[in-house]
Every structure is written in C-alpha cells, then in structure tokens.
Image (tube, helix red, strand yellow):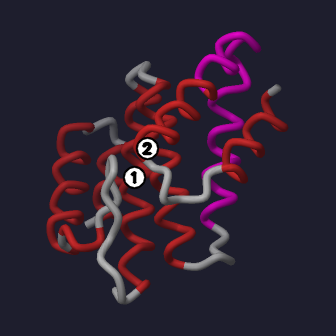
Amino acid sequence: MVDLAELYFHQNLITESSQQLNTAEQTIGSSYLVGEKKEPAQGLVSNYFLPLGKVERLRGEILFKQGQPEKGLKHAYLSYIYFRLFSEAATERQSVIDYLYRQLQDYSVEKRKSLIAGLEKDIEENFKAYESTVFVEILKDLLG
C-alpha cells in the first residue's frame, strides 16, 4: 500500500496517494500509532514501525509539495520516530534528514530557524516521550 501511495505521489495523484497511506495506517492498527501525547502500546513487534515511518515520510513530502513546510516538517519528525522505533540503526532515518536538507536549503535562514523553532515547540508540547534532541540538533547543524 505504501509503495502504491508513492507511485501515485510521483504521478501527482495526491488524493489517491493519501487514501493509500490512510489504508496502510488503518491496516497496521492504532496500537502502533504515535501521535500528539500518544505513544504506541508496549511490547509490539517492531517490524510494523518501518511502513508507518514510510507513511509519515510521504505525508511530509506531500505537505512540502503543497507549500505547507510546518506540517511537512512535523510529519518528517514523526517518520523519524517510527524509523527509530523500528531500529536504532535504521538507515531510513538518514533519508529523512537528507530529504529535509534538500527541501529546506532554499528557505532563508530566518525561515529555517522559524520552522525548526516551531517544531521544537510542538515536540515539547506533544512528543516529550521521544528523544528529539538528536533530530533537532542535526537540522540546526545542517540548516543554521
């Protein structure tokens, strides 16, 4: 489902892509979902976090494409969380950082700082359970 969503995205079929992402998320189940002030249940099989990371990464890409970098950055952060829950060594985490670098490098330094500050505030308010320092510090180092 996530692969089909990516195919639709690359064909600029955003509605169809979003529908596939929602279906993938529903198929995996709410026990695995990370959300504002919500953690996944304990003792879950980690393999399901990988496709959820891909779901959130593509949602972020869709939002960046639609000119909504604040929301896109939040979904990129969620994807980073899922990839980390899948494995501390997941290479997909670096792909999220690489994507964000390419997306954000064209913004002014002030805009990048504003986006990162907004993400930090959102993390502090809603995602305290997840270690976010590394993600935010990498963005700050890369993007000033």
Q: In which quarter of the image is residue 40?
A: bottom left
Q: In the displayed structure, does residue 130 sit left or right of residue 38?
A: right
Could you tell me what secondary structure mostly forms the magenta stretch? helix
For the record, the magenta segment spans 92-115
Q: Quadrant of residue 139?
A: top right
Mark 1 neighbour density, 10 Å: few (under 14) some (14–19) many (20 or more): many
Q: In which quadrant will I find the C terminus? A: top right
In the drawing, what numbered circle is on residue 56? Answer: 1
Q: Is residue 133 above or below residue 24?
A: above
Q: In the displayed structure, does residue 140 sit left or right of residue 57?
A: right
Q: In the displayed structure, does residue 44 sit left or right of residue 69?
A: left
Q: In this view, does 83 lie above or below 13?
A: below
Q: In the displayed structure, does residue 100 sit left or right of residue 83?
A: right
| Residue found 30% across the figure and 55% down from its top | 5
Q: Which of 134 and 65 is in front in this view?
A: 134
Q: Tell me the element at label 1.
A: helix
Asked whether residue 100 is drawn in magenta, I would say yes
Q: Nearer the viewer, residue 111 or 137?
A: 137
Q: In which quadrant will I find the N terminus? A: bottom left
For the residue marked with disc 2, what is the amino acid? His
In the drawing, what numbered circle is on residue 75? Answer: 2
Mark 2 neighbour density, 10 Å: few (under 14) some (14–19) many (20 or more): many
Mark 2 / mark 1, whichever is N-terminal? 1
Q: Nearer the viewer, residue 122 or 29?
A: 122
x and y percentages locating residue 87 in the rendered image:
58, 79
Dots 2, 1 in contact, CB < 8 A = yes
x and y percentages locating residue 46 in the rendered image:
43, 84
x and y percentages locating residue 68 in the rendered image:
42, 22
